[in-house]
Amino acid sequence: MQTLLPLAEKIAERLKARGETISIAESSSGGLLSAALLAIPGASAYFVSGAVVYTPRARATLMDIPRAGVAGMRSASEPYALLLAQTARTRFRTTWALSETGAAGPTGNPYGDAAGHSCIALAGPDIERVITLETGSPDRVENMRAFAKVALELLLKELA
């Protein structure tokens, strides 16, 4: 968590200065994105919502995305990550939404992705970005940290 806090502080500064808000929809990072952003004093000025969308039931309940909404889409993919970010932004009416989905480890997921695979998406004003991270590591905790760090770095870069 300590490596995430400096990034979260910079993000918080920029969001507060701009009067902008953010929502999070994360999966294999397990809440680290939300925790880092909420650890900064004054988070209520910019943080609207965070959801750990780890299962199809969570996707349907928390994000209101039915099975038909993801037909033909793998959950640990760039299109799915973008759908989560777009949905979070719309659903929670935030300026920005950041999503993450992947396979933390120690094994891969049922879709054929190796441990250390994550797709990260950002949706904001006139911008959508999606990236894929492959750490090549089976270390679950380190992968979760890496996924969260890269996601925060993506957001910070776009807020520059």
Image (cartoon, helix red, strand yellow):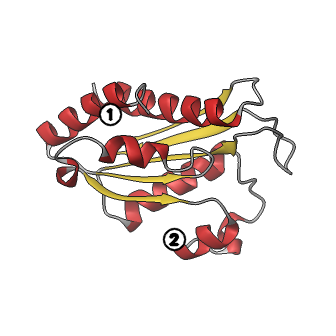
Please tell me in which quadrant of the rendered image residue 3 appears: top left
| Kind of residue sitting beneath label 2 | Leu
Does residue 141 sit above or below 134 in this rendering?
A: below
Q: How many marks?
A: 2
Residue 125 visible (yes or no):
no
Q: Nearer the viewer, residue 54 or 123?
A: 54
Residue 16 visible (yes or no):
yes
Does residue 84 sit above or below 3 in this rendering?
A: below
Give the crowd class for mark 1: few <14, some 14-19, many >=20 residues within 10 Å: many
Residue 35 image point, x, y percent = 40, 46
Residue 14 image point, x, y percent = 20, 33
Q: Quadrant of the C terminus?
A: top left
Please tell me in which quadrant of the rendered image residue 154 appears: top left
State the CA–CA distance, disc 2 to disc 1.
24 Å
| Kind of residue sitting beneath label 1 | Ala
Q: Is residue 151 left or right of residue 55?
A: left
Q: Residue at x 60, y 74 (%)?
A: 60
Q: Nearer the viewer, residue 26 or 159?
A: 26
- Secondary structure at numbered mark 2: helix
Q: Quadrant of the N terminus?
A: top left
Q: Earlier in the sequence, mark 2 or mark 1?
A: 1
Q: Residue at x 56, y 76 (%)?
A: 61
Q: Residue at x 76, y 39 (%)?
A: 105
Identify residue for label 1. Answer: 8
- Mark nearest the camera among 2 and 1 is 1
Identify residue for label 2. Answer: 62
Q: Is residue 97 left or right of residue 93?
A: right
Residue 74 image point, x, y percent = 76, 53
Residue 36 image point, x, y percent = 38, 40
Give the crowd class for mark 2: few <14, some 14-19, many >=20 residues within 10 Å: some
Q: Are marks 2 and 1 in contact (CB under 8 Å)?
A: no
Does residue 16 sit above or below 68 in this rendering?
A: above
